[in-house]
Image: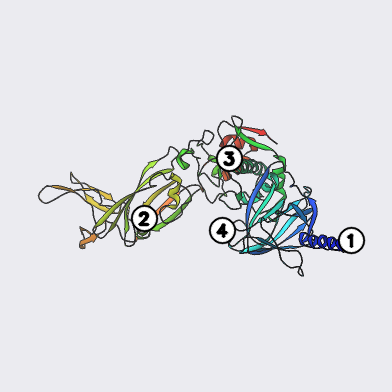
Amino acid sequence: MGIKRSITSLIVLIVGVIVWEGLGDKQVYAIEYDETVNVRLIPSQTFTVTPSGSYRLVNLDTGRLVNYSGTIEFRYSSTGRVGIRLSSSDSLKYSAQGFRLEEETAEYGQDLSITSVQVAGAHRFTTNRYRGSLEVRPALEGESRLRVHNLLDINDYLRGVVPREMSANWHLEALKAQSVAARNFAKSAMDTKPYLVDTIIDQVYVGKTGEHSRTNQAVDETSGEYVTHNGTIINAFYHSSSGGHTENSENVWVSNVPYIRGVEDSYDSHPNNPRHRWESSISASEMGAYLFGDGWTVTDIQVTDRSQAGRVQQLTISGAHGDTTAVKTVPEGSSSADSIRSALGLTLNSTLFDVRTDGQANMEVRVAGGGTENVGSLNGLEMVLADNETTILSGYNLPVRTSDGVEYVNHARKMDEAITFTGGGWGHGLGMSQWGALGMAEAGYTYGEILRHYYTDVQIEQRK
């Protein structure tokens, strides 16, 4: 009997050692936020987390607490698990599902300091602080970094967004308008996908490290407020600068959205706005190589469709390579008009632009009736031949008689002349212009008036 009792005790002891591995015996449930935002962070393969405040660590395999004190090291494992080290003298322990480091209570002053994490798409790893909770899961197949997600209340998320989307020194009413628009954007995005990223793909988010007292004030004073259309929370698109007029949604991203209608935006011409007007250039040969292939040059570029607000909807571009010519329409197929900004071999600030070339209107030709006219290209002109027949000029290396004799030119264009875009605004032009919001705020408008100006037929409603 004594032998059996000893064996039983030994078995219990062994099981206890196997199960423990730092685990407590309390079942843990996640804290509930009023409105949860999930942001994926990008860590290095090994990183540490130092909680400051009331947190608990949960093994997601068992749902039970892991006893820890101080800094926790997380490590990527090629076995498809999450490695964890609780002290420098501790051995690595593993979880197939990962771990959650969660707030026990939602205290304003607490945070998690994470070493070696990319912040807002930066190409370097830094130490950064975050509010809320943290979930660390195994890497996806083919990836070599753990999946790290910051789960937090929407207001705490906005504290790390607003100062990066708008200068904290700007007028408070503009900051409030930005806070509401960013809250709408986050809510709409979380309703359609599992998580956000911390870059401009969603909204630039830098956690607690990037917070500012003035933007925190704007978030707090608009807490729970959303822009709605017919009772539904809208996707409140915003951009840096409209260039003087915002745009209808269908002229940018195809779909017609009733609350995203173009409006006149004179306040965008703020004296400090460096983006209200801009200029960018690319050589004809660079654009030709990008659009048509090596050795090609652009011989003509024309705006063939604009929206009522003036944004370019379509370009028709001609190219040449030796005696071979081609014509391309941009955008192609079902691509949106906004794709023009990145479709030409350079990045354009907006689609609100005019285009010119260095050779524009630099050649004098004699026209029917004996007069002369300045043109930038011979391409497409009708020419009378010696036998009085006519032909439409096209092709490469056209012979042109000049004061210096016969010169062979490429549609009267030099191979590397600059194609210059002069435009206005920065971004897609939908919804609220941030520079325009500043101009309106400084002119005495409230954040509600600003939002109702940029979004059509909307209300500002308090939602939990």
Q: Is residue 342 visible?
A: yes
Which label sits in the foreground, 2 or 1?
1
Q: Nearer the viewer, residue 316 or 228?
A: 228
Numbered disc in front, either 1 or 3: 1
Q: Label 3 is placed on what type of residue?
A: Ala
Amino acid carrying label 4: it is Glu
Q: Are marks 4 and 3 in contact (CB under 8 Å)?
A: no
Q: Nearer the viewer, mark 4 or mark 1?
A: 1
In this view, which residue lies farthest toward the right? 2
Mark number displayed over residue 291: 2
Which circle's residue, 4 or 1, is located before the other in the chain? 1
Secondary structure of the residue carrying numbered label 2 = helix
Spatial CA span between label 2 and label 3 = 34 Å
Q: Secondary structure at mark 1?
A: loop
Q: Mark 2 or mark 4, which is nearer to you?
A: 4
Residue 236 disc label: 3
Q: CA distance from mark 2 to mark 4?
A: 35 Å
Looking at numbered disc 1 in the image, what kind of residue is underneath it? Met
Q: Gap between marks 1 and 3, in whole Å?
A: 75 Å
Dot 4 and dot 1 residues touching (CB under 8 Å): no
Q: Is residue 11 left or right of residue 299?
A: right
Q: Earlier in the sequence, mark 2 or mark 1?
A: 1
Counting from the top left corner in percent of width and height, residue 297 is at 32, 58
Look at discs 4 and 3 and give the one toward the viewer.
4
Task: Kindly identify which residue carries mark 4.
Answer: 141
Identify the mark nearer the N-term, 2 or 3: 3
- Write the residue at 66% across / 46% down: 37
Other residues around mark 2 within 10 Å, as few (<14) / some (14–19) / many (≥20): many
The residue identified by callout 1 is 1
Q: Are marks 2 and 3 in contact (CB under 8 Å)?
A: no
